[in-house]
Image (cartoon, grey):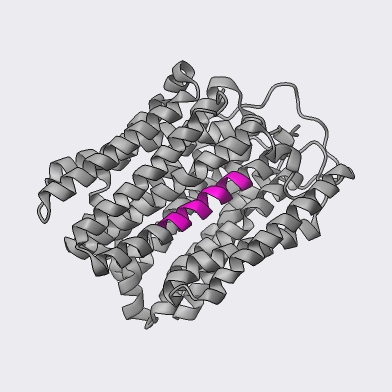
């Protein structure tokens, strides 16, 4: 259940039940919440094309530059579930406003950074701010909409998620190339400030919702979840840099033990009537369980595709950041166009829309592999762009539908928690896919020809799409 509130904090610890009908999420309100989400996604990738400029200006070494990129993702992924739970407890609009304000301020700090150490700290804080605001977006959609309005809103959310990383690379390259006002790489952070301020000015248009009864804090569950996440993230982030030493792999055993302990603690707390950080009863719903099973290989394949594409475009063909990002334009266009029709297609096909999307993605990857293999070292640019476009179309059929499926059975009172789990799974899988795909490609490129390495990675991505296809046959209807 949710409650409607004004921005000032409630006087009592308990909230009254929500009205029988949701408040609705008007056009301006939807734009406001999606704007904050878009900023958080874009900033995960926009900095990539500015690293050389940052290194030249702030004299940062490889390790510091790695932290500029991965530090944001670390605090972002670590804080998502807690951010969602805080939104359930204290109000999703309030947490969104606080998170967006913090994100805007930390973006300004990134742009003003006088040293590389200052920039690293500012990026860590920026990721934490994103973790505060992002879970409130899906939670607000879940609590304030029903039926086709919800399907349309989640479709736009999915389009934002898919386009954000691609647009980040294109926009980053453009801003660095233009060197606006002579500020160079600082523009990739400064651009967030006016956008964030504009969204904050309209935040009152967003309906205010929260759980009917404020959930209590779960310190043990939070500590176990944090420790588990840190171990997994350490392997994903530090593995390529350290050369995958044996002691690093041992952290996965620690993470597994932490996950088992977390499960037992949360089940016991829920059985005693407490408020677990991760509710086992909510996570056991077929839609969430199977939807997350499909989300992991889908997101991992997406992350690997984008990363390996960048390695080939910039490494083999010598494209700059702007040209490399421009090559992803067919993905962006196809994703955006198809996402507009996803609710209608889902209404006709049900969960089979995910099956269709997996087939389209598999076909696009096979087309790309064939074009590269037969045309190397000068493959047909037109056919490559067609393959990238179809990959985007498949992603648009899969992503928004999985979002709807995962959240379909989540009660409004726990929408923040459900959103946090969903986005955490998505971000972790994307990072894992980029790491594994990139490491595999670089390793194969060192022992085989570049085209052989690329084709083998594409074959692995086909396996990922086939896995999504198999899982989709048992997905419940997303409606």
Report the side of 207 relative to 369 (left or right). Answer: right
Q: Nearer the viewer, residue 144 or 446?
A: 446
What residue is shown at x 33% (from left), y 32% (from top)? 360
Residue 230 visible in image = no
Report the side of 233 relative to 56 (left or right). Answer: right
Q: Quadrant of the N terminus?
A: top right
Quarter of the rendering containing residue 389: top left
Residue 187, how many percent across, how many down? 36, 63
Give the answer, above or below, for where 58 lies relative to 256. Answer: below
- Identify the main secondary structure in magenta: helix
Numbered range of the magenta stretch: 420-434
Residue 53, how many percent across, how many down? 31, 73
- As drawn, the residue found furthest toward the top would be 348
- As drawn, the residue found furthest toward the right would be 272
Q: Can residue 454 be found in the magenta stretch? A: no
Give the answer, above or below, for where 371 lies relative to 377. Answer: above
Give the answer, above or below, for where 169 lies relative to 61. Answer: above
Q: Quadrant of the C terminus?
A: top right
Residue 417, how many percent across, how many down? 68, 44
Q: Can residue 432 be found in the magenta stretch? A: yes
Residue 45, how many percent across, how many down? 40, 58
Quarter of the rendering containing residue 62: bottom left
Residue 277 visible in image = yes
What residue is shown at x 83% (from left), y 39% (from top)? 213
């Amino acid at each position: 259940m949710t409650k409607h509130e004004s921005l000032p904090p409630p006087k009592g610890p308990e909230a009254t039940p929500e009205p029988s009908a949701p408040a609705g999420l008007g056009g301006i309100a939807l734009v406001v919440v999606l704007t904050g989400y878009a900023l958080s996604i874009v900033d995960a990738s926009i900095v990539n094309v500015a690293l050389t400029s940052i290194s030249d200006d702030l004299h940062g070494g490889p390790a510091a530059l790695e932290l500029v990129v991965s530090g944001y993702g670390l605090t972002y992924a670590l804080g998502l579930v807690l951010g969602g739970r805080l939104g359930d407890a204290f109000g999703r609009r309030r947490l969104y406003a606080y998170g967006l304000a913090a994100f805007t301020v930390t973006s300004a700090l990134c742009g003003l950074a006088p040293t590389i150490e200052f920039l690293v700290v500012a990026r860590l804080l920026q990721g934490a701010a994103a973790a505060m605001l992002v879970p409130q977006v899906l939670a607000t959609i879940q609590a304030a909409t029903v039926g086709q309005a919800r399907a349309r809103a989640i479709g736009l959310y999915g389009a934002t998620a898919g386009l954000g990383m691609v647009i980040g690379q294109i926009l980053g390259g453009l801003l660095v190339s233009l060197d606006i006002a002579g500020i160079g790489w600082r523009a990739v952070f400064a651009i967030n400030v006016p956008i964030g301020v504009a969204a904050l000015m309209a935040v009152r248009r967003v309906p205010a919702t929260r759980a009917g009864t404020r959930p209590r804090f779960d310190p043990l569950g939070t500590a176990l979840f944090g420790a588990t996440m840190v171990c997994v993230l350490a392997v994903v982030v530090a593995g390529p840099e350290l050369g995958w030493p044996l002691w690093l792999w041992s952290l996965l055993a620690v993470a597994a033990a932490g996950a088992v302990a977390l499960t037992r603690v949360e089940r016991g707390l829920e059985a005693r009537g407490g408020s677990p950080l991760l509710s086992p009863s909510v996570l056991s719903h077929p839609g969430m369980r199977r939807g997350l099973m499909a989300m992991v290989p889908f997101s991992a394949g997406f992350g690997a595709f984008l990363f390996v594409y960048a390695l080939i475009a910039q490494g083999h063909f010598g494209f700059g950041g702007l040209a490399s990002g421009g090559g992803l334009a067919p993905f962006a266009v196809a994703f955006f166009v198809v996402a507009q029709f996803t609710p209608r297609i889902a209404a006709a096909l049900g969960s089979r829309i995910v099956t269709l999307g997996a087939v389209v993605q598999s076909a696009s990857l096979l087309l790309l592999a064939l074009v590269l293999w037969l045309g190397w070292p000068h493959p047909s640019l037109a056919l490559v762009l067609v393959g990238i476009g179809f990959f985007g179309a498949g992603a648009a059929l899969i992503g928004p539908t999985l979002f709807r499926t995962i959240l379909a059975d989540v009660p409004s009172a726990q929408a923040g928690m459900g959103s946090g789990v969903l986005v955490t799974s998505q971000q972790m899988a994307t990072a894992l896919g980029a790491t594994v795909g990139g490491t595999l490609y670089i390793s194969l490129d060192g022992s085989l020809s570049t085209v052989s390495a690329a084709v083998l990675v594409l074959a692995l991505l086909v396996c990922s799409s086939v896995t999504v296809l198999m899982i989709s046959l048992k997905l419940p209807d997303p409606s």
